[in-house]
Image (cartoon, rainbow, N blue to C red):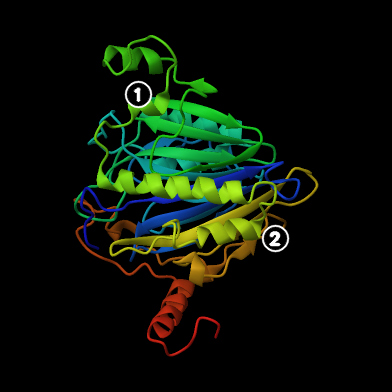
Amino acid sequence: MASSSPDSPCSCDCFVSVPPASAIPAVIFAKNSDRPRDEVQEVVFVPAGSHTPGSRLQCTYIEVEQVSKTHAVILSRPSWLWGAEMGANEHGVCIGNEAVWTKEPVGEGEALLGMDLLRLALERSSSAQEALHVITGLLERYGQGGSCLEDPVPFSYHSTFLLADRTEAWVLETAGRLWAAQRIQEGARNISNQLSIGTDISVQHPELRTHAQAKGWWDGQGAFDFAQVFSLTQQPVRMEAAKARFQAGQELLRQWQGGITAEVMMGILRDKESGICMDSEGFRTTASMVSVLPQDPTQPCVHFLTATPDPSRSVFKPFIFGVGVAQAPQVLSPTFGAQDPVRTLPRFQTWVDRRHTLYCGHQAALELMESDQVSPRE
């Protein structure tokens, strides 16, 4: 896989609608995962589990302490790593993450990826607010770092997160081990590859403001605007491009305010004119997810995942947690054990074919469509 230049359009978009923005009494979550165009994303079901006290858990690069019980999760993830770009758990918690660069330098060492933090939070939380506490606690203890691409040239970033459950949503934005969070109890919200929390901070790292003041980024007077204080003065090209996408997402949500459904969210994820559905030379939307989280706890949450690239030419397949649910083999990538390039040091020196059955079939169909042998309708 070709390495990504510093200004490659690494991007993603997350959306959430909380009543009364939703057309139904439900929180609706959506995310596009924009990654290297040849990267395969699989959909993995992991059942709930009980674990031996004191046991350790291997994440993408490092081990962390395991908890006694973990929740069942459905994950859409780049097939080479442990964590996930987006997913949900059996309690109706959904999380998506985005790459972000701030004034805080990206660590050179290997730690937890933002995608690892996402999966750990889903496995350990029964609400969006609890997931926020899990992520910030792990961030404080282990930090974040390591290459986020399957490539011999390291490429690292920090993460922002959109967390949702049946009643509310949270935006969590990080800068190294520091963070700020905003609670969303009604209306629609989106995030992209930039800091977006201004002065409306619901909760924050206890040293956030003193650190900013010590660095000379904030004079300690007046309102504290997290995005303004921690954003890079000179934004790289990839983040400048994200501004237009973020604004387009805001406008699409505004247009549908009060009428947002799963179908509307799918339409937003399929919007190519805005760049939300990405298809550039090096990057594209490799997988998408939409979740409907009814406020009535007796109603099941429904999660729609593509497991294939380009949502404008993919089918959203439904998933519901329930008795007897199991892994669908068609969306599970092959494994390579100790010989996997992510496990052998130095990492990513060889290439392996991670395509799953559905990906291969979808790829063949796209090639036919692009060669004009069949029309998109066919």
Within 10 Å of the Cα at label 1, are there few (<14), some (14-19), or many (20+) other Cα atoms? many
Relative image position of residue 240 (x, y in whole percent):
31, 44
Left or right of 26? Residue 110 is: left
Image quarter where the N terminus lies is: bottom left
Within 10 Å of the Cα at label 2, are there few (<14), some (14-19), or many (20+) other Cα atoms? few
> Mark 1 = which residue?
229
* Residue type (three-letter) at the residue carrying disc 2: Gly
Disc 2 to disc 1, how far (Cα)? 49 Å
Q: What's the mark number on residue 324? A: 2
Q: How many marks?
A: 2
- Name the residue rendered at 42%, 60% in the picture: 285
Relative image position of residue 22 (x, y in whole percent):
69, 47
Left or right of 12? Residue 296 is: right
* Residue type (three-letter) at the residue carrying disc 1: Val
Res 374 visible: yes
Left or right of 138? Residue 73 is: right
